[in-house]
Each structure stands twice: as structure tokens, then as C-alpha cells.
Image (tube, helix red, strand yellow):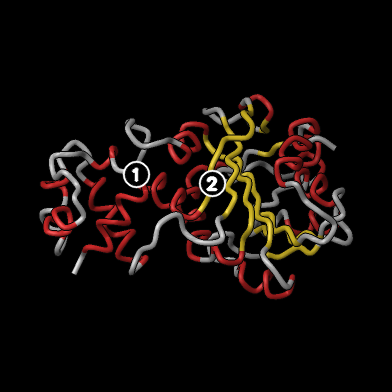
Amino acid sequence: MKPAELLRKHHLKPKKDWGQNFLGDERVLTQLTELLRLQPSDFCVELGAGLGHFTQSLKATGAQIVAVERDRELVPILRDQLPGVEIAEADAKSFDLKAIAARAGGRIVLCGNLPYHLTSSILFHLLDQREAVKRAVFLLQREVAERIAAPPGGRDYGLLSVLVQHVAEVHIGLEVSRHFFTPPPDVESSALVLEMLERPRAEVRDEKRFRALVKAAFGLRRKTLWNALKHFEGGREALKLSGIDPQRRAETLSVEEFAAVERALP
């Protein structure tokens, strides 16, 4: 049943404030599922299961699916439509991925059609629990996906580009027109594929400090690093010690160079 029909059947309307845009096109859902490369032995967590269309496609792979949904009006629909799928009424921003990985006996696969306004929060949550995840595929606003996948040197490259690429191989696997959604959002979407690395791309001494450093560097992205890091404790000295030209701007530094600056901090 298409999303619009299912909503009418249950006398529901999409919650605009929650960013609910439901995807029901079988061809697109199949393509998204293929990007996950699920095996029957896998545990897959879907964040924001909505009406269950993507969940149904995931279930067909034979993998163990945990569908996370916080909307109490949608949870009964999921339980009715998807027997045999574990439905977790919970918030995607705080769902315990490590607990599922412990049950699985290894790293899990993660996916979701994410509300655009929650993208950053969910990505940071993934970064905090990355040891539990081997692969993730998220449907995101296209320009956000392009920023995260961007290489150094351009204006798209920023905080999330560095932090995500520090721990994952990143590429865009699929572009999805807004017209496939119910209701159609105002923007186009892309599927962002994250292959989590066994170890971060470059060593850092303190991950929280690394995040803070990168955030400070991009906080004044039109400024040189010398000016952007003037209030970051030890930042200017670390630039010297790591051999980074202080006249460069944050968007020109690779992940490895940011890590070198962090390691040089006192």
C-alpha cells in the first residue's frame, strides 16, 4: 500500500514539524537496500522506520531488522504490517547501537531516511558509537550529503566532512528525486554510503579535542587558521609544530593534517 493510502487508512497526516516525508517507490527502496549489501547473518538497525516501506525491503534480505520509530501513532502500524520485525519505540538520536551490536556478536549495519533537521544530531550519535557499526546508508538532503562527501579544497568541505571522513570511507550511492516522497520535500535527496574504517584514518590523542579543534577551525572559515585558532588553547603553537602554514584556511586541510595539529596540542 502506498504511503498516501496507508495514511488515509489510519486517518493520519505527515507531521511537518518532524520532517516526515515517506518513501514508497519500490524501485528506489530496492536500490537503497542493495547499497547496504545485507547478508542473512547481519543485524540491521533502521532509524526512523515511518510507515515501514523501507523496512519491508530490508526484511526481504533475510537479515535481522530492528526498526526504530519514535512516533507513537506509527508504531502500531509497523507492528501490524511487519510481523517478525523488532519494532523499537525510541528516539533515533539516542538509540543504543552498541547494545544491538552486543546481541549480534559483531558490528551492525545502519540505515534510515533521515529527517533533514536531525541529520547532524544522528551523525554525531553514529560517530559516538562507530565501533558498533560496519556500514551505514542514510537518505539525506542532497547538498548535505555532498558536503559530507566533499574532498578538501572547496567550500562544501567542512566540519562534518572531516569528522565523518576521519572514521569512514564516504561516497554518494544514489540520487533520489523529491517527487518520490509523500509529501514531496522542498529539496532533492541523496543516499550517503559510509563504510566504517577498522581504525580512524589518522591517529588523534583526544577525539573530543579533535572535534573541538576542527569546529574552531571552521567557525571562521573565511579567516586564516592563524586567526581562526587564536582563541583555541595551544592552537597557534600546534600549527607551527605540525608544519601547517598558518595562512591557510580550514577547508584546505586534509583529515590527516587536522589530526597532526591535534597531536601537536599541549
x, y (%) of residue 102?
68, 75
Question: Please, what is the three-letter code of the amino acid marked with disc 1?
Answer: Ser
Query: Is 112 placed above or below 85 here?
Result: above
x, y (%) of residue 129?
53, 66
- Along the line of sight, the residue nearer the viewer: 258 or 22: 258
Query: Is 133 placed above or below 169 here?
Result: below
Q: Which residue is mark 2?
A: 169
Provide the secondary structure element on which disc 1 rests: loop
Report the number of numbered marks: 2
Residue 253 placement: quadrant = top left
Horizontal side, residue 141 vs residue 220: left or right: right
x, y (%) of residue 238?
17, 59
- The residues bearing labels 2 and 1 have C-alpha atoms spaced at a distance of 14 Å
Horizontal side, residue 206 vs residue 123: left or right: left
Q: Which residue is painted at 82% across and 61% down in the image?
A: 41
Residue 18 in sight: yes
Q: Residues within 10 Å of mark 1 (few under 14, many from 20)?
A: some
Q: Which residue is mark 1?
A: 254
Horizontal side, residue 16 vs residue 26: left or right: left
2 or 1: tag closer to the N-terminus: 2
Query: Is 131 placed above or below 165 here?
Result: below
Horizontal side, residue 192 vs residue 54: left or right: left
Residue 101 placement: quadrant = bottom right
Badge 2 vs badge 1, beta-carbon distance below 8 Å: no
- Along the line of sight, the residue nearer the viewer: 239 or 182: 239
x, y (%) of residue 1?
85, 38
Q: Which residue is painted at 52% across and 51% down in the image?
A: 168
Q: Residues within 10 Å of mark 2 (few under 14, many from 20)?
A: some
Question: Please, what is the three-letter code of the amino acid marked with disc 2?
Answer: Glu
Residue 34 placement: quadrant = top right
- Along the line of sight, the residue nearer the viewer: 257 or 164: 257
* Quadrant in which the C terminus appears: bottom left
